[in-house]
Image: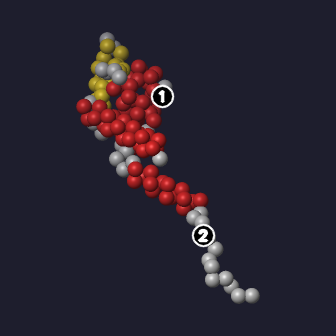
Amino acid sequence: MAKSALKPATRRPAAATREVRSARASAAAPALDRLIHERLRLGIVSALAANDSLTFSDLKSLVDSTDGNLSVHARKLEDAGYISCTKSFAGRVPKTEYKLTTAGRRALENYLNHMESLIRKMRNT
């Protein structure tokens, strides 16, 4: 029996389809601020955007974090210039206070604008 000249329809494997979707998503989100995108850091920046300043204890309670976890993430935001940290004493008790910087507010606004843009694109497709 002779072989058919017609090739069977080729289908893209599921993994390749996921890669294409991932590439499209990456192309749609090139400017996503990965520093703010992390859940706890987004919570910290958002809480500080809604308040003039917050103590370590207040921030810890708002974002429901442990001391160590909050400290590490706050330091990353501080190193990026998104938040400022001042340490003082109230009597003999140490007090750590955080504020959102101008750069941090601008970064949060850019992040929110970017996410809103992605949401609009997804709803229109």
Q: Nearer the viewer, residue 22 or 5?
A: 5
Q: Position of residue 35 (x, y in %)?
A: 37, 41
Name the quarter where the N terminus is drawn: bottom right
Q: Quadrant of residue 121?
A: top left
For disc 1, the marked residue is 65
Q: Is residue 119 above or below residue 13?
A: above
For disc 2, the marked residue is 10
Q: Position of residue 32 (x, y in %)?
A: 37, 45
Q: Nearer the viewer, residue 4 or 35?
A: 4
Residue type, numbered disc 1: Ser
In three-dimensional space, the C-alpha distance between marks 2 and 1, rounded to whole angstroms, equals 50 Å
Disc 1, SS: loop
- Classed neighbour count for the residue bearing mark 2: other residues with Cα under 10 Å, few (<14), some (14–19), many (≥20): few
Q: Quadrant of residue 59?
A: top left
Disc 2, SS: loop
Q: Earlier in the sequence, mark 2 or mark 1?
A: 2
Q: Is residue 71 visible?
A: no
Q: Determine whether label 2 and label 1 are within 8 Å by CB.
A: no
Q: Is residue 13 left or right of residue 76?
A: right
Q: Nearer the viewer, residue 5 or 94?
A: 5
Residue type, numbered disc 2: Thr
Q: Is residue 90 above or below residue 7?
A: above
Identity of the residue furthest to the top in this view: 91
Q: Is residue 1 left or right of residue 10?
A: right
